[in-house]
Every structure is written in structure tokens, then in C-alpha cells.
């Protein structure tokens, strides 16, 4: 099915800049939808205005000239505006995922030589923990405030650099692929004309910001008058939530790796609006073709593609309802416009049909190369034979040219792999492993645990004789590697096999199924029907046999995507909708079975182990009032594996038991569970904001039982949190600050917030703030009268505020550690005792941090 509004992308259109082509779409489709997410909705006019503001802000800071600008931002509409703004300023954008490990973020910023780091809220939080001292870090909201919305008057040529995308490197460190406007436009031209993209289309954006596949999703839409719909699969989930979103938003063009595509196709669900399905990044299988034919309309086409950051889309194969695959193999098809493919031998000569060799792409529109790495560029790119400007890129992929120049993909030639659409070089993973003091040697390979499902397997030789838990290695790697680069399975060997020349013989590495699984407690078989069914789901999902009921999901290769698949399978089995945090709180089959038997979607325990290794006394930490514990994962990583960390989740968040609105009762419950883990001794306690109030009450109760407190750490507290225990002067200073901050935010930022956050005018915003305060007062009155709360007043944050306002803290008899926001340092007296007068009798250790 072709859109009636499709206009062919002419070859002459590539001789301009990306912003130039985009601004022509703005002129034609000013009031059409350009980008929509759950929190933002921009027309072309609004998106252009915001991008122009970004461009003016960057030019004001850096002036004209090409240079890299790092975008430390999550996927979403602001990131798209930032990308356009950087390009409009004549700069290169360098996308960085704020959830990446700190080491990788710092390497990318440093290697790119970024002149400026533009960050959203998540990016600012990540940047605070990094030593990003050379470039300045600018918050997106602050950067665009009060900037002109007109287009900058810059002349940007088609050969101007546009971006740098970092991929896993064979040398053990990431490498940056850079490209120019002309080549990006040529890539969009190839997609536009092959898929007949027009203004009526609605395109998905499911890729991570750092995945180069996002380039085609964004610009296929915005350079053709269509709309792009970002969707964060890590937060919003795959499976049924993704399927419902696709139907609700009436998506017409779907794009992802095959694994995610398979997740939402269950039951008799159909998607009448979708006319094109793009599967790229991993090899598609006949299973994907069967699912396509079962769940989509006859006018929908399946497009299988081969692409790379260095080439853009180079091969495509289209499948419709009449297509048959005689041998069951899904090819990657035929050459796209101006991208000439061949299969070559090691000496560079083209081989005959049906002979396996390396896939090479010849074109004038290949990426110039690798950023600041001429050695890598010269190794991968060669001049074309005709001397007419064409170059040849050796992809490192193995293939076979079938009759009629239809190409079949056969995997990687070298040791680089594709895992869930992301390029992974084993050398980088091996380097991270051997950098750990507990590992002497390591070899990383890929194994297909099922047809079309590759997984990384790490073979490890420990440095000592006591052995290393796989969970410890996985946590250590998470500090430096993205999730998709962490091996699914760890196989422990006494030594790596070597060949006659002394190199590691990877062919001689034992198959993972031949090696016993390292379990901390041994194998425990399922005991009833529920556990048997869960074991079947786990074994099929994790491709590991056998799995016991005490095995940890994450220790056996589970990750965020497989956790979402597990919850989807459990929902089909039980008809219970389980929230994403379920697997964190109940990571074993035994724990999940208890939830299923009780019909409960989450664990009713309030003590959640986030890191249980180590002989040191554990740290018990009370999080923010919304009960979220996922942000404490970063604290667990920094504490390492010597000290366990437990989160104390406010009682009743799951709805599985009555909600407590009394901090004393909540602290009593916490004490009971703390003493189950640590019956006696010197306790380490912590709490943040509202949680600090609860932590102080826990300390009092433990001391009343005859125990001692080694550390009481109160994080991000204010004079509001401890009425009666702080000086009046401190409360007055903070009250004035809060009032001025609220008024300034509402009135000064109203035009900006209304433009891209869709926040109403100041009076309405102030009314909303007042309404929230009234809601808390009404809840307090109803609770005081022992009357039940209406559903609208029974949310977690309201109950937490009520509990907080009713509680009066007592002076702590020991010494407290305060960790305060450095931005508020001017609000406190030089002597902490002058402000925190009666909070701790024996004084304070105060630390101000960003």
C-alpha cells in the first residue's frame, strides 16, 4: 500500500544540508505533527522553533565552525530537537546514552573532543558523577531559554560533517564513525523511494540514542513531512505494551531488530495501519516471515535490510503474502541505489555465485571513516578500481551471492558479533574482564542458543583458587560496559585452550551445555505445577537447562529485554499484569511462584536486596517517598561487592496490604525485617529526603533495643524535614528560597515550558501547586477522622506526605552524617550545628556534593 502523498526523493536533493531539506518540510507542513511521545507533541513549526533556539544557544557559546557537540540525552522529542539544533549550528552531534557506564561516557566525550555537552535531566544527573572537566555541560532547558526561534543564517554545505556514532571496537575500545550531510541525505533518498514514504506516514523510533539505526527512523520521517514516534522500550516495555502502543498511535512504518518484533505478536492481534515492517540489525528468520504473514494485512510488506553505520542501507529484500522461501533462508536481497555489493575473497577479488566470501560495498556515498583513527579507516576502506571517487568498504560480514544477484547473509567473518542489533567486539569485553583483579584470562565468543538468537559466552580463568561468582563478574562489568555487551553465560575453566602457535584456540572452547552451571546453592527442582510452568518459561527464554527454582534470573543471563519477555509470558500464563520491578524484587522461580499462587503482582516484603555479597555489615537504605528503588542500583555498583545493600520500600506500595500513613508504624515494620537480616550489632542506616526521616526513626528504635548505630547517613535533607530540630533562621532562609524558586520557575520559564513541555500559563500552574497542597490537607483530615481515603487521594506520594507532616522527629543521640546538595550550600550556616541545632547530639559530618 502506497501513501497518496508520497513524492519521490530526487537525486539532486542530496546536494544540500539536512536542515535545508527539513526547513522545506516545515514550510510545506508547518502544522502537521512531527514528533509525539507520551510527554511531548510537536508540530513541524514547533519543532523547528525549538531546534532554532538550540542552534542560537550553541552559536552564542561556541561561535561558527564545525566541531563535535555531545548529546547526553535519553531518547525522546527533546533529543530530536537537539540533533536538529546542532546541525543547524553547523556542528556535528555525538549521541550518548545517559544510562551507559560512566567510563564509556567519559571515553566518548574525550575521544570525540566534544566542545560542549548538552544534557537533559537524566544526562545532567549522569554528568554530575563524571569528571567531564574539559567541555562544559549545559542543561537543555537552560540552554534554550530566551533564545530566538528564527533560523540561523548559516551556509552549511553538503560535505559538512553531520555526526559521530560510536560502535564497539575490535581493538578493545569503541570507535567513532563519522559522516557528512550528503551521505545522510543519500541514505534517506534510498529509503524514501524504496518504501515510498510520505507525509501521511507514522514511523517508530525504538532504537537507543547511540544506535545508528535511529538516523533513518528520525530523518525518514522529518525529511519527508511524516511523523516520528519515539518509544523507550527499556522503560515502557516490549511485548503487549509495545503492541498496544503501535495500535493506539496508528503506526504505519515499524522498524526494529527481529527480537523485539517477535515480542508483541501474540494471539489474534492485528495491526491494520502498518504498511511497512523494517527488520534490520540482526538476521531475520523464517519465523519472522511466518509471524508477518499471520498478523498483518495483505497490503503490508516486510522489508529485510543490510546496513551498517559506515554504509547506510545497502541491500533490501521485500516480502509480501505471495513470497515463498524455497530453502527457508531469508536473504538480505538486492543492492540499493548507488550501493554496489560484491562477495570477495581475502585477496579482494570477487568470487563466483554460490561461493562464500566477505561482503563488500562499493559507492561514492560511504562514510569518510573513523573519527581520528586513520589506521582503522585505511584498513576498512579502499579506493574503487575506476578511480572515479568510489570507495570500497569491507564489511567483515560473510555472505553468498545467489543466482540473480540476491545476497545471503552468513554471519561475521571476524570476531565481531551483532547482539540484539548492537555491534559487539569480543576484544572490548575481554579487555574489561581481564581488567578485573579476580580474572587472569578471558575469551568471549558467541553461540546461537536458538536459531537466530545469538548470545555472548565468556570463558574465564580465575586469578585465584577460590572461584568467582558469575553475579560478581556481571556487576563489575556493568560499571564499564553497556547491558548488551555483558555475557549471558560465564564458563569457568582451569585454563584456555591454545593452538600450536600459542594463540587461544577458540574452536576448542567447550560448548556451554557441556559445562556444569556454577550455582551458589546447587540445583533445586520444581515442587508443584506453578514452578514447573515457570521453569519451562525460563528455560525457553534463557536457553539454559536445567534451571532450578532458587536460581537467580540475572545470574543466568537475564537482562532488561528478556525480563520484559518473561513478564509477558507470565501474564499469558496467569492473566496477572506484573509491573517491571517484579523481576528485581523476585528474581527466582520460588519467589515468583509465591506471587502467582497469591495472585499478587509484586512482593509484599519491604526489604529488597539490591546487592547481597560481601562480609561487611549491610547498609539499609530508605529511598524517596515514591518507593522507587531502581536508582539505588548505581549506589550498589559504587559500594562494590564487599558491603551488601538493602532497600527499605515504603509499606503498602503494591496494594497487597493496607497502606501505612504512620512513620512510627512503618519504622517498626522496617526494624523487624532489618533484624531478620542482621539480628544484632552496629547498624549502617541511610535515607534520602523523606526516607531520611524514616531512617532516623529506625535508628531510635534499634537503639532502644540495645543495639548501636555505626553510621546514620541522611541524604538531601532540608530544614523542612525535621521541624523542631533545626534553627528558625535556617527554616526562614530555606522558605524564602523555595518561594522565590517557585515563583521564578512559574513566571520566568512559562513561555519556554509552554512551548515544549506543554505546561499552561502561570496562574494555572500556581493553581495546580495549590491543588496538590489541598489534596494533602484533605487526606490528613480524613485519616485523622479514621475515614477511608478516596482512590484519587490514596496514591503513594500523597500518603507519604501525610505521614511526613504528622510525624515529629526526635533528637538523635549519636553523630550523624549529612550529604547535602552543593547548590544549596549558601543557604546554610558555616557551622552545621548552628542550623541542625538539635538533630544530632554528638555533632555532624557534613558533605556537600553536586
Image (cartoon, grey):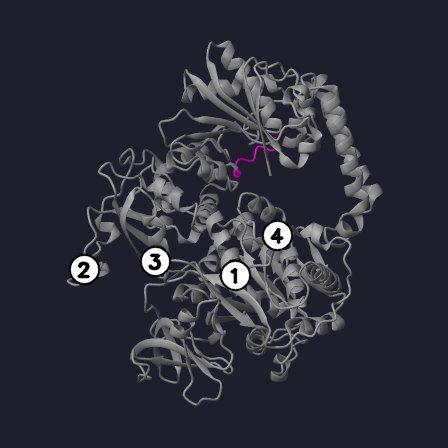
Q: Point out the frontmost of discs 1 and 3.
A: 1
Position of 417 relative to 360 (above/below): above
Going from N to C along the chain, the mark reached first, 2 or 4, is: 4
Q: Which residue is mark 3?
A: 427
Q: Which stretch appears magenta?
A: 625-631
Going from N to C along the chain, the mark reached first, 4 or 3, is: 4
Residue 782: percent from left, percent from top? 73, 21
Q: Nearer the viewer, residue 528 or 518?
A: 518
Going from N to C along the chain, the mark reached first, 1 or 3, is: 1
Q: What's the distance in space between the residues labelled 1 and 4, CA to CA?
A: 14 Å
Residue 364: percent from left, percent from top? 50, 82
Q: Point out the frontmost of discs 2 and 4.
A: 4
Q: Quadrant of the C terminus?
A: top right
The kind of secondary structure the magenta stretch mainly shows is loop
State the SS at label 2.
loop
Q: Which residue is mark 2?
A: 502
In the image: residue 791, left or right of residue 665: right
Q: What's the distance in space between the residues labelled 1 and 3, CA to CA?
A: 21 Å
Going from N to C along the chain, the mark reached first, 2 or 1, is: 1
In the image: residue 283, left or right of residue 145: left
Amino acid at each position: 500500500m502506497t501513501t497518496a502523498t508520497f513524492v519521490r526523493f530526487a537525486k539532486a536533493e542530496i546536494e544540500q544540508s539536512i536542515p535545508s531539506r527539513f526547513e522545506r518540510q516545515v514550510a510545506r507542513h508547518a502544522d502537521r505533527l512531527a514528533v509525539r511521545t507520551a510527554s511531548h507533541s510537536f508540530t513541524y513549526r514547533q519543532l523547528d522553533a525549538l531546534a532554532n533556539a538550540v542552534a542560537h544557544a550553541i552559536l552564542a557559546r561556541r561561535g561558527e565552525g564545525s566541531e563535535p557537540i555531545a548529546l547526553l540525552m535519553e531518547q525522546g522529542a527533546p533529543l530530536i530537537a537537539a540533533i536538529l539544533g546542532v546541525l543547524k549550528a553547523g556542528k556535528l552531534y555525538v549521541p550518548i546514552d545517559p544510562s551507559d557506564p560512566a567510563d564509556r561516557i567519559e571515553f566518548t566525550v574525550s575521544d570525540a573532543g566534544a566542545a560542549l555537552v548538552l544534557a537533559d535531566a537524566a544526562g545532567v544527573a549522569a554528568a554530575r558523577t563524571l569528571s567531564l572537566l574539559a567541555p562544559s555541560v549545559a542543561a537543555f532547558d537552560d540552554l534554550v531559554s530566551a533564545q530566538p526561534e528564527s533560523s540561523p543564517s548559516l551556509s552549511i554545505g553538503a560535505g559538512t560533517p553531520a555526526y559521530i556514532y560510536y560502535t564497539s571496537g575490535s581493538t578493545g575500545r569503541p570507535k567513532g564513525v563519522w559522516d557528512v550531510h550528503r551521505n545522510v541525505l543519500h541514505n534517506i533518498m534510498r529509503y524514501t523511494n524504496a518504501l515510498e514514504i510520505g507525509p501521511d506516514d507514522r514511523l517508530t523510533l525504538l532504537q537507543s540514542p547511540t544506535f545508528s539505526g535511529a538516523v533513518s527512523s528520525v530523518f525518514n520521517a522529518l525529511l519527508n513531512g511524516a511523523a516520528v514516534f519515539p518509544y523507550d522500550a527499556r522503560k515502557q516495555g516490549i511485548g503487549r505494551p509495545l503492541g498496544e502502543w503501535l495500535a493506539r498511535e496508528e503506526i504505519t512504518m515499524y522498524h526494529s531488530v527481529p527480537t523485539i518484533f517477535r515480542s508483541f505478536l501474540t494471539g489474534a492481534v492485528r495491526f491494520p495501519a502498518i504498511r511497512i515492517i523494517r527488520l534490520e540489525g540482526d538476521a531475520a528468520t523464517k519465523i519472522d516471515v511466518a509471524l508477518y504473514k499471520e498478523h498483518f494485512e495483505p497490503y503490508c510488506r516486510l522489508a529485510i535490510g543490510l546496513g551498517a553505520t559506515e554504509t547506510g542501507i545497502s541491500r533490501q529484500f521485500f516480502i509480501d503474502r505471495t513470497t515463498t522461501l524455497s530453502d527457508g533462508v531469508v536473504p538480505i536481497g538486492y543492492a540499493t541505489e548507488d550501493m554496489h555489493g560484491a562477495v570477495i575473497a581475502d585477496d579482494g577479488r570477487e568470487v563466483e555465485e554460490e561461493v562464500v566470501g566477505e561482503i563488500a560495498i562499493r559507492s561514492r556515498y560511504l562514510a569518510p571513516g573513523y573519527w581520528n583513527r586513520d589506521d582503522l579507516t585505511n584498513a576498512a576502506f579502499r579506493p574503487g578500481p575506476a578511480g572515479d571517487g568510489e570507495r570500497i568498504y569491507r564489511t567483515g560480514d560473510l555472505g553468498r551471492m545467489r543466482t540473480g544477484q540476491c545476497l545471503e547473509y552468513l554471519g561475521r567473518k571476524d570476531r565481531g558479533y551483532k547482539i540484539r542489533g548492537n555491534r559487539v567486539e569480543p576484544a572490548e569485553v575481554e579487555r574489561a574482564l581481564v581488567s578485573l583483579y579476580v580474572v587472569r584470562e578471558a575469551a568471549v565468543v558467541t553461540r546461537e542458543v536458538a536459531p537466530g538468537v545469538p548470545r555472548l559466552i565468556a570463558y574465564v580463568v580465575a586469578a585465584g583458587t577460590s572461584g568467582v561468582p558469575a553475579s560478581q563478574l556481571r556487576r563489575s562489568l556493568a560499571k564499564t560496559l553497556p547491558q548488551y555487551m555483558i555475557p549471558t553465560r560465564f564458563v569457568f575453566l582451569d585454563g584456555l585452550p591454545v593452538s600450536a602457535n600459542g594463540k587461544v584456540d577458540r574452536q576448542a572452547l567447550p560448548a556451554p551445555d557441556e559445562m556444569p552451571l556454577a550455582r551458589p546453592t546447587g540445583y533445586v527442582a520444581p515442587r508443584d505445577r506453578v514452578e514447573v510452568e515457570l521453569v519451562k518459561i525460563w528455560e525457553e527464554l534463557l536457553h539454559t537447562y536445567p534451571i532450578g527454582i532458587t536460581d537467580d534470573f540475572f545470574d543466568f543471563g537475564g537482562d532488561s529485554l528478556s525480563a520484559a519477555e518473561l513478564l509477558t509470558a507470565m501474564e499469558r500464563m496467569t492473566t496477572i499484569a506484573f509491573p517491571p520491578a517484579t523481576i528485581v524484587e523476585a528474581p527466582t522461580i520460588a519467589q515468583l511462584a509465591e506471587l502467582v499462587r497469591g495472585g499478587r503482582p509484586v512482593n509484599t516484603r519491604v526489604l529488597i536486596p539490591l546487592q547481597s555479597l560481601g562480609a561487611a555489615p549491610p547498609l539499609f537504605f530508605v529511598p524517596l517517598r515514591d518507593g522507587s528503588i531502581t536508582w539505588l542500583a548505581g549506589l550498589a555498583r559504587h559500594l562494590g561487592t564487599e558491603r551488601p545493600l538493602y532497600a527499605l520500600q515504603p509499606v503498602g506500595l503494591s496494594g497487597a496490604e493496607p497502606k501505612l500513613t504512620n512513620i512510627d508504624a512503618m519504622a517498626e515494620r522496617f526494624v523487624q525485617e532489618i533484624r531478620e537480616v542482621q539480628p544484632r550489632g552496629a547498624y549502617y542506616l541511610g535515607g534520602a529526603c523523606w526516607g531520611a526521616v524514616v531512617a532516623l526513626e529506625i535508628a531510635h528504635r534499634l537503639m532502644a533495643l540495645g543495639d548501636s548505630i555505626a553510621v546514620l547517613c541522611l541524604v538531601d535533607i532540608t530544614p523542612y524535614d525535621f521541624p523542631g530540630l533545626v534553627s528558625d533562621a535556617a527554616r526562614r532562609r530555606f522558605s524564602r528560597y523555595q518561594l522565590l524558586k517557585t515563583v521564578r520557575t512559574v513566571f520566568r520559564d512559562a513561555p519556554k515550558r509552554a512551548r515544549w513541555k506543554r505546561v499552561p500559563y502561570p496562574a494555572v500552574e500556581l493553581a495546580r501547586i495549590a491543588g496538590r497542597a489541598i489534596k494533602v490537607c484533605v487526606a490528613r483530615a480524613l485519616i485523622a477522622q479514621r475515614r477511608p481515603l478516596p482512590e484519587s487521594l490514596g496514591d503513594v506520594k500523597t500518603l507519604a506526605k501525610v505521614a511526613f507532616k504528622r510525624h515529629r522527629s526526635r533528637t538523635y543521640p549519636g553523630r550523624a552524617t549529612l550529604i547535602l546538595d552543593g547548590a544549596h550550600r549558601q543557604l546554610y550556616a558555616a557551622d552545621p550545628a548552628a542550623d541542625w541545632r538539635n538533630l544530632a547530639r554528638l555533632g555532624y559530618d557534613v558533605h556537600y556534593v553536586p
